[in-house]
């Protein structure tokens, strides 16, 4: 009987490239499924339109009467587009998105029904939230949670359902999602950064962070996927010997895109564009069957929603093309995993990108000021930034010479470094009220435009300045990127608050504004040196050097997470009203639980596969060899038998060794799991899972992967790496 693996392989050979139909030119259908500004203009009265726009810009709440109007306009628009249901769409702490669909229709007494959707249904819902993780905030007898409309992110239609982006909070007001702290961090950043910007330009009244993410992912044929229980249950392969060829020849990155994959991408883009996700680039990544897509950057909250939606669309569209998408950070051992670079900057209501070096000295003075503040923020909170990207999947990637290390540092490039060095050489302004301070701006070194060429790149840095934005590269591919973003927003808000206090203090003593700013910036440039690193972040020298500089190197999740609930972090988040101590503690519990459960599931899958798939196969093959050896013995004289059976006997022994190794490894792992399960404290339990369960995976895997090379290919039950990785 053919194994599942061969049936799957045969299926992949029959695959055709799915036809892709562009409805019309992209600009015709772009955003057609979103309740965007232009739709609002069309469907809302002038009064309602202004109220919504005002809420978006200022965060002021919308009058009840107006929300009824908006709801009825949304309903009319959505029904024209074929929607039958609506849902509040939110990001619970599971990391994915949640939705509960309700029909528009209400039955009438005359046996008919009428579509119905009111302001109250738009602005708030009360989903029974007891099954979402809350980290103990919401005990099950108080199961109510509220979702509340976020007017700053456009509603959209997916699968005939009107999806309304919302926040998700507990009955007692604690946030149970990713969006709430993100929105709060944006408000904190706005307050702090606007004040700083107003030193330079009084017409600046609003600052908002921007995000352009780059999403990496793998595609695998659905039949092969189905034949790998590990992929189905954990999103990664727990076994698999390296393919003879994988990424050694560097022939995949930016290579010609396979026709099947290209058709998938085109469809993905069509569907994403309808939803207003501004996808712009697509390309092959380093590993075989690994790809990336990236949109034009947007305001952070919308960009995060779009990323969550895109991850959903990746999975949905992949199925149509008989693929499965793998968003896991490390689906295959030995080749590159996937990340999600976060390009981050800040923009103003005046249309200025605060991280774009200006053409004039005045603009550059502002630019350097902002930059110096970010350096200080990252210096002070590098450990928190590291914690914001911690997950069991990302642990396999960070520091494995394919992604930045777990040590956070900032790369600035030659030009900016030179500029900062020059500023450091300039004298500090001593006089409090002399004319000296008037020349500050003139003395600010020019930044040559060459910078914007992007020629100066360092791919190994976790936090790199790339011409007009910072690129945070340590984020994992499956992450809800709200978390690193709200951390970054908050630490920069905190730093800018401190900066303003320092500058104001000098000005109160009589120092001219520019001189005061200059002096503080200069002191920052000196004080933040430890966080700057221009060299190879993958090197072992850097690990040593970073330790000398006192930078943290928390290599895995249980080591990294505690920083989230340190007194310093709690004070930070509480001060800026982003998260309370209670919320932070709850989130920490959820995160640790998730870590434990992921390892637990992986351990079970690994154990089951080893015992139920691999061992029987190995023994079957071994029996065949034994039979063969017996046969040889019958027909040969003793001397020839000795000679001819040497290989066979040694293979039989080798198989025995691996079989024994697997049995022993699995039973030790099961024992360790039992012990770890008995631990009460979540952090201790996570550490036990890491040190006694996870730590055994590699050894079991080594035996299995060796067997893969020994056992007859015809018997091997699991699709091999060479089959999974090369799209047919
Ligand atoms: P690369 O990193 O390959 O040089 P780009 O310069 O095109 O690519 O930018 C990569 C990502 O950075 C894109 O998503 C882009 O929209 C985003 N990006 C560009 N400018 C900004 C900005 N000011 N704020 C946030 N993201 C930005
Ligand atoms: Mg990039």
Image (tube, rainbow, N blue to C red):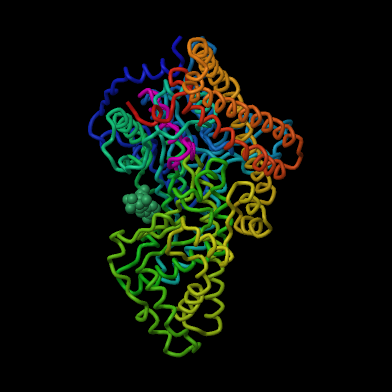
- The answer to whether residue 280 is visible is no
Location of residue 423 by image quarter: bottom left
Counting from the top left corner in percent of width and height, residue 166 is at 52, 38
Q: Which is nearer the eye, 238 or 319?
A: 238
Number of callouts: 0
448 sits to left or right of 133: left
Counting from the top left corner in percent of width and height, residue 579 is at 62, 51
254 sits to left or right of 635: left
Is 633 one of the magenta-colored residues?
no
Counting from the top left corner in percent of width and height, residue 427 is at 45, 85
Q: Residue at x 29, y 20 (%)?
A: 16
Counting from the top left corner in percent of width and height, residue 315 is at 43, 29
Is 323 one of the magenta-colored residues?
yes
Q: Is residue 648 above or below residue 423?
A: above
Q: Residue at x 29, y 29 (%)?
A: 263
Location of residue 384 by image quarter: bottom right
Q: Residue at x 53, y 40 (%)?
A: 393
Q: Which is nearer the eye, 480 or 725?
A: 725
Q: Which is nearer the eye, 129 or 410?
A: 410
Q: Image quadrant for the C terminus?
A: top left
- The answer to whether residue 483 is visible is yes
Q: Residue furthest left?
A: 25
Bounds of the magenta segment = 311-338
């Amino acid at each position: 009987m053919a194994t599942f693996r061969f049936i799957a392989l045969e299926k992949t050979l029959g695959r055709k490239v799915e036809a892709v139909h562009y409805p019309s030119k992209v600009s015709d259908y772009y955003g057609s499924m979103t309740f965007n500004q232009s739709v609002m203009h069309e469907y809302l009265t002038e009064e309602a339109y202004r109220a919504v726009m005002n809420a978006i810009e200022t965060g002021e709440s919308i009058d009840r009467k107006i929300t009824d109007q908006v709801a009825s306009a949304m309903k009319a628009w959505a029904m024209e587009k074929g929607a039958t249901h609506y849902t509040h769409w939110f990001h619970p702490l599971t990391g994915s998105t949640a939705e509960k669909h309700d029909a528009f229709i209400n039955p009438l007494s005359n046996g008919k029904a009428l579509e119905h959707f009111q302001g109250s249904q738009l602005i708030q819902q009360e989903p029974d939230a007891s099954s979402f993780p809350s980290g103990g905030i919401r005990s099950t007898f108080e199961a109510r949670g509220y979702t509340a409309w976020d007017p700053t992110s456009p509603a959209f239609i997916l699968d005939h359902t009107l999806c309304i982006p919302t926040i998700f909070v507990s009955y007692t007001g604690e946030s149970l999602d990713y969006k709430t702290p993100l929105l709060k961090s944006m408000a904190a950043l706005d307050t702090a950064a606007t004040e700083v910007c107003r030193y330079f330009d009084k017409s600046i009244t609003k600052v908002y962070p921007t995000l352009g993410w780059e999403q990496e992912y793998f595609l695998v044929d659905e039949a092969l996927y189905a034949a790998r229980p590990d992929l189905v249950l954990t999103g990664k392969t727990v076994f698999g010997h390296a393919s003879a060829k994988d990424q050694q020849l560097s022939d995949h990155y930016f290579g010609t895109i396979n026709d099947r994959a290209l058709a998938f991408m085109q469809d993905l883009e069509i569907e994403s564009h309808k939803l207003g996700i501004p996808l712009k680039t697509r390309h092959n990544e380093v590993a075989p069957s690994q790809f990336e897509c990236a949109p034009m950057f947007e305001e952070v909250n919308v960009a995060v929603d779009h990323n969550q939606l895109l991850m959903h669309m990746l999975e949905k569209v992949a199925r149509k093309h008989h693929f499965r998408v793998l968003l896991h950070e490390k689906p295959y051992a030995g080749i590159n995993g996937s990340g999600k670079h976060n390009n981050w900057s800040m923009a103003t209501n005046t249309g200025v990108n605060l991280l774009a070096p200006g053409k004039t000295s005045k603009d550059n003075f502002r630019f350097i000021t902002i930059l110096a503040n970010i350096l200080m923020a990252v210096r002070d909170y590098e450990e928190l930034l590291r914690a914001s990207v911690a997950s069991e999947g990302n642990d396999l990637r960070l520091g494995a010479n394919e992604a930045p290390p777990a040590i956070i540092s900032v790369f600035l490039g030659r030009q900016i470094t030179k500029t900062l060095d020059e500023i450091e050489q300039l004298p500090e302004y001593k006089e409090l009220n002399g004319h000296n301070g008037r020349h500050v701006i003139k003395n600010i070194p020019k930044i040559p435009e060459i910078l914007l060429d992007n020629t100066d790149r360092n791919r190994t840095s976790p936090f790199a300045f790339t011409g007009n934005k910072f690129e945070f590269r340590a984020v994992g591919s499956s992450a809800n990127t709200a978390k690193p973003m709200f951390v970054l927003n908050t630490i920069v808000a905190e730093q800018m608050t401190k900066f303003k206090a320092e500058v104001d203090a000098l000005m109160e003593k009589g120092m001219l504004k520019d001189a005061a700013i200059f002096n503080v910036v200069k002191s920052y440039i000196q004080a933040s040196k430890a966080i700057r690193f221009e060299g190879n972040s993958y090197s072992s020298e850097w690990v040593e050097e970073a330790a000398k500089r006192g930078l943290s190197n928390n290599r895995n999740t249980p080591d990294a997470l505690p920083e989230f609930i340190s007194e310093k972090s709690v004070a930070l988040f509480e001060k800026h009203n982003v998260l309370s101590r209670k919320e932070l503690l709850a989130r920490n519990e959820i995160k640790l639980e998730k870590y434990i459960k992921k390892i637990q599931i992986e351990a079970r899958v690994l154990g089951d596969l080893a015992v139920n798939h691999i061992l029987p196969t190995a023994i079957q093959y071994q029996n065949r060899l034994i039979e063969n050896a017996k046969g040889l013995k019958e027909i040969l004289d003793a001397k020839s038998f000795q000679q001819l059976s040497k290989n066979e006997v040694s293979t039989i022994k080798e198989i025995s060794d691996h079989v024994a190794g697997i049995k022993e490894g699995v039973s030790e792992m099961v024992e360790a799991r039992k012990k770890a399960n008995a631990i009460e404290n979540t952090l201790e339990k996570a550490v036990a899972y890491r040190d006694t369960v996870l730590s055994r995976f590699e050894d079991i895997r080594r035996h299995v992967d060796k067997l893969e090379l020994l056992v007859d290919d015809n018997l091997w039950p699991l699709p091999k790496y060479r089959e999974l990785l090369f799209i047919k």
